[in-house]
Image: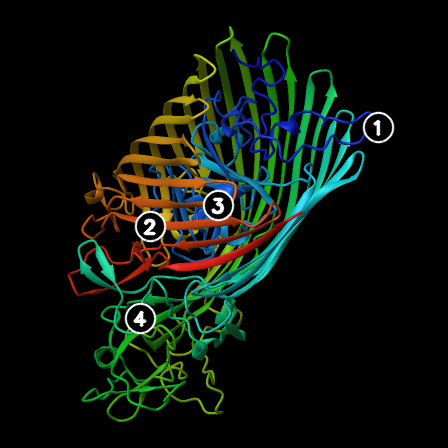
Amino acid sequence: MHVKKTALAIAVALCGSGYAPEYLSPLAQNADGSIQQEDATKNEAPYWEKIVVTASPSGATMQEASVSVSSFDEEGIMKLAPRSTAEVFRALPGIRAESSGGGGNANITIRGIPLATGGSKFMQIHEDGLPVLEYGDINFGNTDNFLRYDWSVKLIESLRGGSASTFASNSPGGVINLISQTGEIEGGAVGVSYGLDYDEFRLDFAYGGEINRDLYFHIGGFARGGEGPRDTGFNGDQGGQVKFNITKVLDAGHLRFHVKHLDDKVTTYLPAPVRVKGNGEYGPVANFDASSETLHSAFTTNISGFDAYGNPQNRDLTDGIESNVTSFGFEADLEVARDVFLVNRFRVSDISGGFISPFTDTFGDYGPQSADNMAAAICESALDGNGNPFNCATTSVTLANGTNAGDTYSGLAFLNLLFDTKFNDLGNMINDLNLRKEFDNGVSVTLGYYYSKQDIATSWQSWQTFIQTVDGTDSQYLHIEDANGEALVNNGLWVPSFLSWNWDLNYTTTAPYINIGFEVGDNWLFDVSARRDTVDANGELLSRCCGGTTDVDLNGDGVISGNSEDASASNGFGFGGGVINLNQAGASTQIVNYEASNTAFSVGGSYLYSDSLTLFGRYSEGGRAIADRLLQIAGTLNSDGSLTSTTTGFDETEQLEVGVKYASKDYQINATLFDTVTQDTQAEVTSGLTFIREYEATGLELEGNYSFGAGFSISGNLTWTDAEISDDKFNPALVGKTPRRQADVIYTLIPQYENDDWLVGASIQGSTDFYVQDSNALKQDGYSIVNLFATWFVSDAFSVSVNVNNATDEFVITESEEGSAQIGDIIRARPLNGRTSSIAMKYTF
């Protein structure tokens, strides 16, 4: 009825391994010892018969395993018409990926686990079984900033809940794993794609095959350039990636070495002015459409400012999210004795770059509004260098640069708090070692040890504030003077030094783990696992807020003049008009020096009713170390860097899930009922708020596909979630509210038709309505984003594809800084991309 698991039961305990079934034993060889090349044209087994390899305790197939797991291959990803890696993730069941930030900076969560701030706190993103970053919510360093999907990826696999608690550190919610091509199937491809209604060119390539009888390789990557899917006025998406691996086949297993180099820049989109058309409906403001334009501009790209220590520097706004990653690693998968298997995975990564983008802020009454109103509000609040008010009988607003510089301006203006961060070092070294013994009675025991060293060395670069025009193509700085001609905003610059923080932290994680798997009869599979994570945190945060006492000639005219250059001036908010002192004079220091531990466990089982039907259940408890955001929450660290009694250094997640899986030749369906309790300790940069909360969520996850015959089929998934804030230490009034941005239902449907010459279809991704803030006052209506795809197979080797993302040009926001608004108000929000279309050509060989 099924393949007995004696050699596979609870096999490998791969702790996130990224490899398909053939990697569990030495590859088949011909009589001369050469590798038996697979026939790429033969029909592969259905994907539900593939071995689960991501954060899973067993060598069971997707159909048999007591976990919820899904995957997309290259063809499936193409159908989504993705404009970023996060847009691939949002089609996975149970996963909520807010891809409104552009090519990076996405917010990702799973199964009702909250998105209190940004990043992917409770789930990790892996490449070939090891995390890209140990923590998915590092301030400005979201994991998706440092990886790209391209043709070097064979499969994207996700595991939700369950054994992720014990088979990976810091990911109790689940794991998304990008599994690389390795060249066991010889061949390759090269292709180009162009934006039809946006500026981007991209070249992709991949090739792999046999070098000799026991050695094979794969190389792949991409290069691109252009503005990206929104108008910026410059080439903000620029760079590429190359990945290479080589595999040596041994009598007892294999060794694999791999390298990756990513050097890429993408424009990131932060909250910007959006018009409220109704409670749940939004649209563009005058002269600016946030779904297809940005507040970046060719007129505002060169920024003169200061690093975290007060040293003058120039910054280039076109850098956006700058990602530089060079990594090297190896994998050993060996049978070291009879039925004793050793698996070791190692990777060291050098990660650096930066993050710079305009954020639409509001200090008091300074939200997006007419330039005249903003000028009056600024003048009424300001004091000169002697502490006296300015003459606000009248104010004047003129364009400071660009087209028509010097002309009077009375249109819409916004306050740009320039998020300016450098990633000095986000590098890490990770090793995962496990030893597995298979017994003849079907019992398997795995012992493992995980080691990770994650650096977090970032600089918040003396953030500056500017007053600019709201313009979707040519935003310009504004110059504001009082009735006496005194500068309140000097050529766009309002405050030259809002804050300056320098983080220099190191987190060392060690985690022994154990898994025991066993069979009962021919129909039952069970496993139980445990993990003990210990985090040793060291370092310091050097912080200085709101200016200093040193006059600096910012505009280079040789004269210290104006509010923005006179350090003795004040703008009424206590911000000195000058800059931070050199060497952070007067800065405060928070030492970090603590150790924290957490024990996770998971127990699960499957009942194989038949070859087609499986019932399963699992209960898990896991933890997530809080990392750098802990330093932003008052009362969590003592002055000597030790933890106070208010925190353990970990947030915990409990999950119970039961499910059923049915698969046949024509259709397959999975259903999982889940219940989740999550603790969350968080700090939000944009609002300055901190959270210590508990969330509860109950839901149902559905996934399936059906073949109608004659080339017609449909696939998709749907997740229903009932979530609430069950406890809040700082704001009890929120208890019982629905967590921000949590919809009752999210779904993806992919109908298609395919024959020998054509593939056409649509991917429909949607959501019911949701509240944009925890106050539950302002919401986004339910929506459906329709993506269209079509491929013409000109020959066996050459194809042409066209896809359209958001074909109906829906205006949908994923988040808002405001929690309430009236019709006609302007809020600060991030919308999904408007309609974009592209064409691609691919040649395979």
Q: CA distance from mark 1 to mark 2?
A: 54 Å
- Residue type beneath disc 3: Trp
Which of the marked residues, 1 or 2, is nearer the chain's N terminus? 1
- Quickly name the residue at label 4: 288
Instruction: Identify which residue is drawn at 69% across, 16% down.
Output: 339
**What is the x, y in percent for residue 318?**
50, 70
**What is the x, y in percent for residue 698?**
29, 31
Which label is found at residue 785? Answer: 2
Are dots 4 and 3 in contact, CB under 8 Å?
Answer: no
Which label is found at residue 758? Answer: 3
Horizontally, residue 321 falls left or right of residue 446, namely left
Instruction: Identify which residue is drawn at 39% across, 33% down.
Output: 653
Q: Residue furthest right?
A: 32
From the image, state whether disc 3 or disc 2 is nearer to you. 3
Q: Residues within 10 Å of mark 1 (few under 14, many from 20)?
A: few
Q: Residues within 10 Å of mark 2 (few under 14, many from 20)?
A: many
- Residue type beneath disc 2: Ile
Look at the picture and state if 77 lies above or below 203: above
Which label is found at residue 32? Answer: 1
**What is the x, y in percent for residue 351?**
59, 54
Are dots 1 and 2 in contact, CB under 8 Å?
Answer: no
